[in-house]
Image: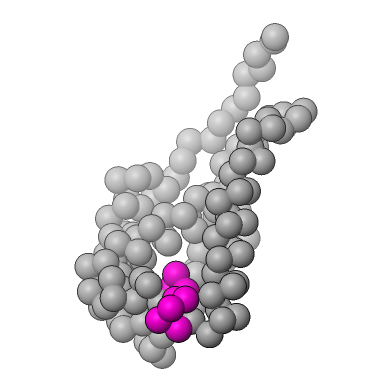
Amino acid sequence: MVEEDVAVPAPRSWDRPAVTVPVFAALAAVGGQFPGFTRQANLFILAVGGVFVWVGLAGWVRQPARPLIGRRASAAWWWLLPAAVFGVLESATFLLGSSDSYPTFSRLADPLLEREVVRSVGYFGWLAAFWGLVRR
């Protein structure tokens, strides 16, 4: 197999973990202070998500494209199983009315998300995952 030398652009100074992680931590700390589903929380999410979409569409942080593989491994299909099980369970409990007998996952998470620290950790995870998508 012949390896090709591909010029990889150096990341911009602001697109490094030493910069993005503290910024995400600060955004998560602010976002965690808002109670869920309030106007302020929704505006915060829309503002941060809108900036991420704008940065992604502008192409400021694109990573070099990975080489395509001819065939996906059959083991990759096993990743769909947990997503399908989650979707079926969440849909069934939602259709049953999300009662105490059949709560949705979001209703089960409500007691945890009442704490600001847990909400901030959730925001940080959301920011990190969204940033990974923006960079693709």
Q: What segment carries the magenta color?
A: 99-106
- Residue at the far right in the pictured view: 70
Closer to the camera in the image, 72 or 80: 80
Is 47 left or right of 92, judged from the image as shown?
Answer: left
Q: Does the magenta stretch include residue 15?
A: no
- Give the quarter of the image for residue 13: top left
Q: Is residue 27 among what the camera can see?
A: no
* Residue at screen point 42% across, 48% down: 15
* Residue 136 x/y as whole percent: 59, 47
Image point (32%, 52%), residue name: 21
- Which residue appears at 31% of the width and 83% of the height? 35
Looking at this view, name the residue that lies furthest to the front. 101
* Residue 87 percent across, percent down from the top left: 59, 64
In this picture, is 98 found above or below 55? below
The residue sitting at the bottom extreme is 39
Horizontal side of residue 4 vs 46, given as left or right:
right
Residue 51 visible, this angle: yes
Quadrant containing the N terminus in the rendered view:
top right
Could you tell me residue 28's position as x and y percent? 31, 66
30 horizontally vs 7: left or right: left
- Please name the predominant secondary structure of the magenta segment in the image: loop
Q: Position of residue 9 (x, y in %)?
A: 54, 35
User: Could you tell me which residue is drawn at 66 percent across and 17 percent down?
Assistant: 4
The scheme the figure's colours follow is one colour
Q: Who is closer to the viewer here, 88 or 29?
A: 88
Q: Quadrant of residue 33?
A: bottom left
